[in-house]
Image: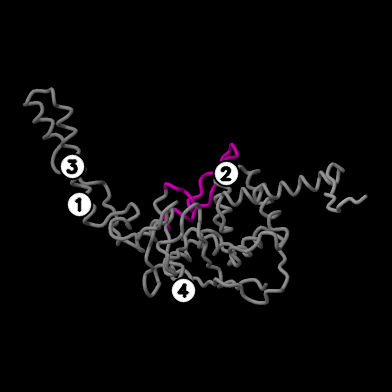
Amino acid sequence: MAEATREEVIVWVLESAGLHMRADTTEAGKLVRLADVVRRLMLVHELPRVEAVEALCTALETAPVPPTLFRAYSGRRAELLEGDAALFGFHTEETWAKHRAAMAWQRIQEARESNRFASTEWSERGLRFIGWPPPEPVAAPAFVVPGVPAAVRYIRENWPVSPRIRLDGTSVRDALDYVRGRAFGLSIRLSDAQALWGGHSEPVGDADAPVELATYADLVRHRQANPGTSWDTPENQIALLRAEVDRGARVVERGLRKRIGAELGASTQRIAQLLNKELGKRASVHAKAGGNVTDLDTKRRTG
């Protein structure tokens, strides 16, 4: 089968990073995680991470119609992000005013609690010292528009940094898969992703042409172009998977199998099944080589 072109990189998987990539059962309900788009841009177009993140943000900003944003979850349908839910930790003028009022009220309550056992005179002095409203912050926040503008700002500020290796050999969490990150699970419709970055959902080219996988990058391209196909053809797919797992283990990469699963369109449970299958084959080969296993005699004895 011919390799997908560099523009045809966006495909759909049912689960990514343990999240259910559907908003509903229709074709329009299929979703793509934006973190996966960044990784595919890096892989297929050979971009450094900073450039891949910027390419993602630029495409979102310049889309003729801004894509609808969803947040995917584990074990349930994705939910539409709109209004205050699509601020990603930033503020509009309205939400900032509400936040200021809430903080001021909290200061008053704290002052009253601290002066609960003081005389009336000292309590009043304490409240006057606290003041109303609270003093203005040193720098006012830059207000955002909910939706794509807020998401792009958050992504630009948090996603370009690659995971670093600490002195003790452990790795820092990847911002693309950080479950407490405000953009974890941020997704758009598959149709929108394909319109922005290209894609295909059916194999292209000659289905009988041989596929040669020499590296893990080849494996990622093959699995993304052929979701749901057998792991036995080509034969070295699981071996390449094992090599990548061993490489990540040597550098003590945290969230290794989640990252690999996201790239290959497989759950961590499926990754474990494949690795166990590969270990079983390896043990069988060694046993036969040592003469410990004999082929089963299926011929009926006569006489």
Q: Which residues are magenta?
A: 155-180
- Identify the image quadrant of residue 147: bottom left
- Disc 1 to disc 4: CB gap under 8 Å: no
> Of the residues shown, which amino acid type is indicated by label 1?
Ala
- Disc 3 to disc 2: CB gap under 8 Å: no
Q: Give 35 or 130, whichever is nearer the viewer.
A: 35
Say if the magenta span includes residue 166.
yes
Q: Nearer the observer, disc 4 or disc 2?
A: 4
The image's colour scheme reads: one colour
In the rendered view, does 185 fall on the left or right side of 237?
Answer: left
- Would you name the residue on which mark 4 appears? 195
Relative to residue 23, is residue 206 depicted above or below? below
In the rendered view, does 79 fall on the left or right side of 18?
Answer: left
Q: Which residue is found at the position 44% from the left and 51% from the top?
A: 75
User: Residue 279: x, y in percent?
Assistant: 71, 46
User: Residue 10: x, y in percent?
Assistant: 53, 67
Circle 2 sits in a helix, a strand or a loop, which is it?
loop
Circle 4 sits in a helix, a strand or a loop, which is it?
helix
- Would you name the residue on which mark 1 appears? 97
Which callout, 2 or 1, points at the residue further toward the start of the chain? 1
Please tell me how many numbered marks the rendered image carries. Answer: 4
- Would you name the residue on which mark 3 appears? 104
> Of the residues shown, which amino acid type is indicated by label 3?
Ala
Q: Which residue is found at the position 58% from the left and 45% from the top?
A: 253
> Of the residues shown, which amino acid type is indicated by label 4?
Ala
Badge 4 density bin: few <14, some 14–19, many ≥20, Cα 10 Å = few
Which callout, 1 or 4, points at the residue further toward the start of the chain? 1
Which callout, 4 or 2, points at the residue further toward the start of the chain? 2
